[in-house]
Image: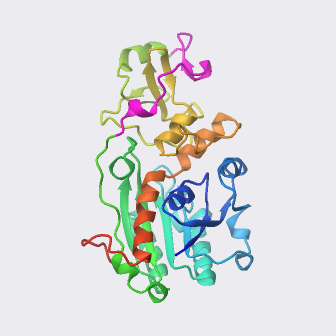
Amino acid sequence: MDYRVGSLYAGVGGICLGFQQAGFTLEWANEYDKYACITYRTNFKHKLIEGDVLNLNISELRAVDVLCAGFPCQPFSVAGYRKGFNDHRGNHFFKVMDFVDTMRPKVIFLENVKNLVGHDGGKTFRIIRESIEDRGYSFSYKVLNTKDYGNIPHNRERIFIVAFDKESTGDAWRLFDFPEKKPLITRIKDIISNEQVDESYYYREDKWFHEEFKKLINDPNTVYQWRRKYVRENKNECCPTLTANMGTGGNNVPIITTQYGFRKLTPDECFAFQGFPVKTGEYKLPDIANSHLYKQAGNSVSVPVIYAIADNIMKALNGVQVCQEMLLF
């Protein structure tokens, strides 16, 4: 059966791509950031509505079977101010619920930062859960790390919420479970380029911190972090969590050492650490400023993780038992 997907806060299409790979049909998407829209349109041909989701006329959009929303995470992030629903961006969740009320999708798929569960002593998450369950949906959630579920050496934890409309999908909610862990086979060296890249990515001896790099950055199989005044080594053989500000020269800039010198990760490599098929040319980066591309990679989701969840959703909708051990709430 053909299941149609609508995606809010679509970014550069990480969620969309994962669902597409799992066999879903992409009906429409919405994104506010104009540069993210450029990247999205470079890779997808279906309808993209550019603009603030709060201003969308829901009745003008075709109803979908699966409603996806990686709604703004800054209000709930450890790195943010943790204002939750008191932050205007937190109100976006209730706009998502307006879409649910109007379209009544078979499945709701939400993504956010892992801190969402514990925010405000659990009150925020309780509101989200009750809002979904009161509408007759099931409620399952799990925090998944890219390195454990996506076969990508990227230490990135996110919470995923999957809810089935119990009335229209029958026992599908009972058949669903989140994916099982998989071995991490892909290594950092499989993702970073062995070739010499553009000179703009290198840190040469004219930089005052070059001597610090020489003392502390010595393993070509590690991604380090430059945090303005010091270097942080990551010893778990994974790339540290990529952030939206990693291209600004501020905190958390990912640094590697190669035979050609010390350098930051390229945008292509950052997208690859999120599981986008950039090396094969299946996903292309547009000709826009690198600062925008770094931000997009840092704000995105890890495509293989999305695919693994979406594949299980597809199986459940088609009446296939996913796993005997289920997270049902």
Query: Which residue: 50% across, 40% down?
Result: 272
Q: Is residue 242 above or below residue 86?
A: above
Query: Which residue: 28% across, 47% down?
Result: 183
- 249 vs 114, left or right, is right
Colour theme = rainbow
Q: Quadrant of residue 239?
A: top left
Query: Which residue: 62% across, 42% down?
Result: 284
In this view, which residue lies farthest toward the bottom? Answer: 167
Along the line of sight, the residue nearer the viewer: 124 or 311: 311
Residue 241 at x, y = what percent? Answer: 43, 43
In this view, which residue lies farthest toward the left? Answer: 324
Query: Which residue: 62% across, 73% down?
Result: 95
Specify the principal SS of the magenta part: loop
Q: Quadrant of residue 130?
A: bottom left
Is residue 38 on the magenta stretch?
no
Residue 68 at x, y = what percent? Answer: 55, 67
- 110 vs 329, left or right, is right
Q: Is residue 10 above or below residue 219?
A: below
> What's the magenta region?
186-208
Numbered-mark total = 0
